[in-house]
Image (cartoon, rainbow, N blue to C red):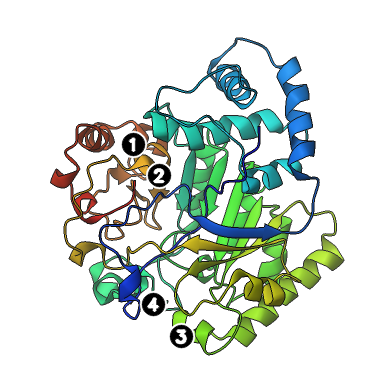
Amino acid sequence: MVSNAFAGGEGRGGCPIMTAMGDPKKIYRKHQSFVGLRGKAGPGAEAVAARLKALDSAWPSDGDARVRVVREALDELHGRRQPPAGQEAFALHDNSAAEMARLTDEELPRYLHYRFRYEAFPARRRLDEWPPLVQVEPASSCNFRCVFCYQTDSDFTKKSNGHMGVMSFETFQRVVDELAGNVEAVTLASRGEPLLAPDLPKMLAYARGKFLALKVNTNASLLTEKSCHALLAAEPQTVVFSADAAVEPAYSQLRVGGKLDKVLANVRLFHDIRDKHYSKSRTITRVSGVKVPGSGELDDMEKVWGGYVDQVAFVDYNPWENTYERPESGVKAPCSDLWRRAFVWWDGLVNPCDVDFKSHLAVGNVLDSGVGPLWRSAKYQALREAHEAGRRASCSPCNRCTFI
């Protein structure tokens, strides 16, 4: 079945002028961050459901680990298998259906294998050899100082503190070589703006065709004709342009350092290049903003941005820009991201979380050990076990975070 609920997303949170939003008691579900998403008409959920039914009929009942996971996903989607007690059944949400609609029939099993592990494994505390998703950071620096972002933390952005930098192509190549064939979902973005990495075009070319769910997030302010071609030629599944408003001065008040007219012109340039040179592109383009006071309504966003992208969305505000100064949350539930994704910073450091943007929880470095071994390392496992045992309060900054 296909659900109308939203899952996944590219949320960012926190704002000094938005105290009312930073509710220290509110629980944030990181894998359900969309508060609104609209897209251009496509094949739709019914067409995807019909293709999944055909796959269901042909897929074997047993086999290796990947075959079994796909069979489990299909059985749950079609109601033949019940989830564990207290858990929601696996469902394909609107954004997932849109992604699947652009895949070939041969690619559908790979997508289901990734998505079931991304959606169901974290809730059920299941783990295998690889993260369902890896976020790779081409650059930790940014040319914006958005009011809801940890780039406003001067201790983080001070170069002498060692957090700022760009990933070398050699490090990127090493990470991609390890992940290819083992991980389907890779997002190029995390703490900074990817287009600040000089080697990004080379990185995109190297990653082309290696991941079914390659995604790039950018504030679009640095887009050029060259970078538009580099992005489109790499054939990512999704390119997200981050924008939270459709009018000035709201845009530049929220995205400090940015100008709406410049970003709008760049997104239009990307649209025009895609139409002219990549008319058969399967890449989904989305303008996604953080839903905060001053960001306007989805109708306003759609009117301004909708003519240039496939989707327009808002994601929930998540207060993480001041993680280390927040009061202890009292949250005892485990953070699902410990079973969902891993982060590789520009210098190769592997971190379980980007709320911990200063890497207090780092488990190692890919230059010393690969992503796979670190995902199952004793340090990573100890953090998961502490969360599962109700000892989240003993972990910092988990004790100040409200993500589950």
**For the residues marked 1 and 4, what is the alpha-carbon distance in whole angstroms?**
33 Å
Location of mark 1 (residue): 374
- Where is residue 141, by image quadrant? bottom left
Up the image or down, 89 lies above or below 319; here it is above
Front of the two marks 2 and 1: 2
- Mark 2–mark 1 CB contact (< 8 Å): yes
Front of the two marks 3 and 1: 3
Location of mark 3 (residue): 253
Q: Residue 94: horizontal and vertical position, in percent?
A: 64, 47
Seen at 42% across and 26% down, the residue is 128
Q: Earlier in the sequence, mark 3 or mark 1?
A: 3
Nearest the eye: 179 or 89: 89
Q: Where residue 147 is drawn, which disc sits there?
A: 4
Q: How many marks?
A: 4
Q: Is residue 264 left or right of residue 150?
A: right
Location of mark 2 (residue): 342
Q: What type is the residue that disc 1 sits on? A: Leu
Nearest the eye: 345 or 248: 248
Q: Earlier in the sequence, mark 1 or mark 4?
A: 4
Q: Earlier in the sequence, mark 3 or mark 2?
A: 3
Helix, strand or loop at disc 1? helix
Q: Is residue 233 left or right of residue 110?
A: right
Front of the two marks 1 and 4: 4
Seen at 68% across and 73% down, the residue is 305
Helix, strand or loop at disc 4? loop
Nearest the eye: 404 or 225: 404
**For the residues marked 3 and 1, what is the alpha-carbon distance in whole angstroms?**
40 Å
Q: Residue 243: horizontal and vertical position, in percent?
A: 56, 73
Pointer 3 local density, CA inside 10 Å: few below 14, some 14–19, many at least 20? some
Q: Residue 73: horizontal and vertical position, in percent?
A: 58, 25
Q: What type is the residue that disc 2 sits on? A: Ala
